Image (tube, rainbow, N blue to C red):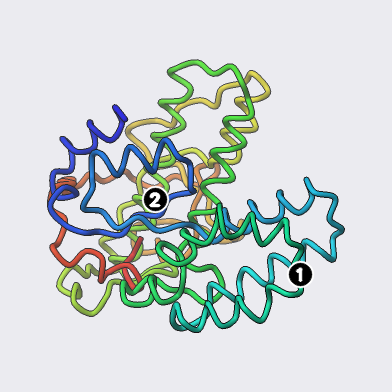
């Protein structure tokens, strides 16, 4: 709860608009958001719904074929264009399901499917993806890294703080790359005025997240990069970066082989969130 209270102070715009926010069905988080940000539109992650169904089937002695059937059935329901179409599909699928699963779906999942996760909910918000629902591969990749960190039970506060810094720096770079027409993300048409030239890309120095977790779990904290230099390794090791003009569409992680002069820029305040922020999500840079 305290986290969202602090977030409310740092980002007051979140209290004024019905922005969509994706949750993983964790009751404490759902309740906290409902209390602090009752205006936000909570959406359920398809990946977590899938994981919950898979876990339930296995806990009840189901085979791998059962897992495939029930998870595929879940996705069929989620992809229906309307709630009425979903109910019709459910009526067709129910006779093939065990009574125990039907009870589980009705009591634990149906409200999430109908109110927070179905295509008919996501599509009007501009966040529907027929394959992944509302979450992206980037989001799930970050979740995977965070889970690996949490699996390491004893962590020092400074290690957690440094890890969160590197996470922030990585995604800030992705946002900046998108604004400069680099990488796989682009600004929505309504925000083309925020575009910058490719030569304006200024990467923030950070340690590769996987490497950070690996070194942390081996009790060997990675050294902090030189604050006066950017230490970057292009995705293609054969690529040589000799000047800022050569920083283009490569993916970067911090290493020691290539050095690029550091540039600073004035940060954009978090409070400057556009009123129609929700409409950016499909094509925006993040």
Q: Position of residue 15 (x, y in %)?
A: 16, 47
- Per the image, the residue denoted by label 1 is 69
Q: Quadrant of residue 158?
A: top left
Tag nearer the camera, 2 or 1: 1
Which of the numbered marks, if any, corresponds to residue 131?
Answer: none
Which quadrant, please, contains the N terminus?
Answer: top left
Q: Position of residue 147 (x, y in %)?
A: 58, 38
Which of the numbered marks, if any, corresponds to residue 171?
Answer: 2
Q: Quadrant of residue 201?
A: bottom left
**Callout 1: SS:** helix
Front-lying residue, 237 or 1: 1
The number of discs equals: 2
Q: Is residue 200 left or right of residue 140?
A: left
What residue sits 61% from the left and 56% below the top? 237
Q: Earlier in the sequence, mark 2 or mark 1?
A: 1
Quick check: 28 above or below 285? above
Q: Position of residue 54 (x, y in %)?
A: 71, 55
**Callout 2: SS:** helix
Callouts 2 and 1 close, C-beta under 8 Å: no
**Mark 2 crowd level (few <14, some 14–19, many ≥20, 10 Å Cα):** some
Q: Position of residue 59 (x, y in %)?
A: 78, 45
Q: Estimate the spatial distance between the alpha carbons at disc 2 and disc 1, rounded to whole Å.
A: 36 Å
Q: Is residue 36 left or right of residue 217?
A: left
**Mark 1 crowd level (few <14, some 14–19, many ≥20, 10 Å Cα):** some
Which quadrant, please, contains the C terminus?
Answer: bottom left
Front-lying residue, 34 or 87: 87
Front-lying residue, 170 or 249: 170
What residue sits 85% from the left and 50% below the top? 61
What residue sits 35% from the left and 55% below the top? 42
Q: Is residue 240 left or right of residue 237?
A: left
């Amino acid at each position: 709860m305290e986290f969202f209270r602090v977030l409310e102070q740092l980002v007051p715009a979140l209290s004024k608009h019905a922005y969509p926010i994706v949750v993983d069905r964790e009751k404490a988080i759902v309740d906290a958001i409902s209390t602090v940000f009752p205006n936000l539109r909570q959406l359920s992650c398809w990946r977590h719904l899938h994981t919950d169904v898979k876990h339930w089937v296995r806990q009840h002695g189901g085979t791998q074929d059962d897992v495939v059937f029930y998870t595929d059935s879940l996705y069929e329901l989620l992809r229906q264009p309307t709630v009425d179409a979903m109910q019709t599909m459910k009526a067709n699928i129910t006779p093939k399901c065990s009574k125990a699963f039907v009870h589980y779906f009705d009591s634990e999942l149906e409200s999430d499917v109908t109110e927070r996760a179905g295509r008919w909910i996501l599509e009007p918000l501009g966040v529907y993806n027929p394959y992944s629902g509302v979450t992206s591969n980037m989001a799930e990749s970050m979740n995977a890294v965070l889970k690996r960190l949490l699996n390491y039970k004893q962590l020092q506060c400074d290690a957690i703080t440094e890890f969160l810094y590197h996470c922030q720096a990585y995604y800030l770079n992705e946002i900046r790359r998108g604004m400069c027409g680099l990488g796989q993300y682009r600004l929505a048409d309504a925000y083309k005025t925020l575009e910058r030239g490719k030569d304006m890309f200024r990467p923030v120095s950070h340690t590769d997240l996987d490497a950070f977790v690996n070194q942390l779990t081996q009790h060997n904290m990675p050294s902090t990069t030189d604050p006066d230099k950017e230490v970057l390794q292009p995705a293609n090791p054969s690529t040589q970066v000799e000047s800022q003009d050569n920083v283009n569409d490569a993916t970067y992680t911090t290493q020691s082989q290539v050095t690029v002069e550091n540039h600073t820029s004035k940060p954009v305040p978090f409070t400057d969130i556009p009123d129609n922020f929700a409409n950016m999500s499909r094509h925006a840079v993040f």
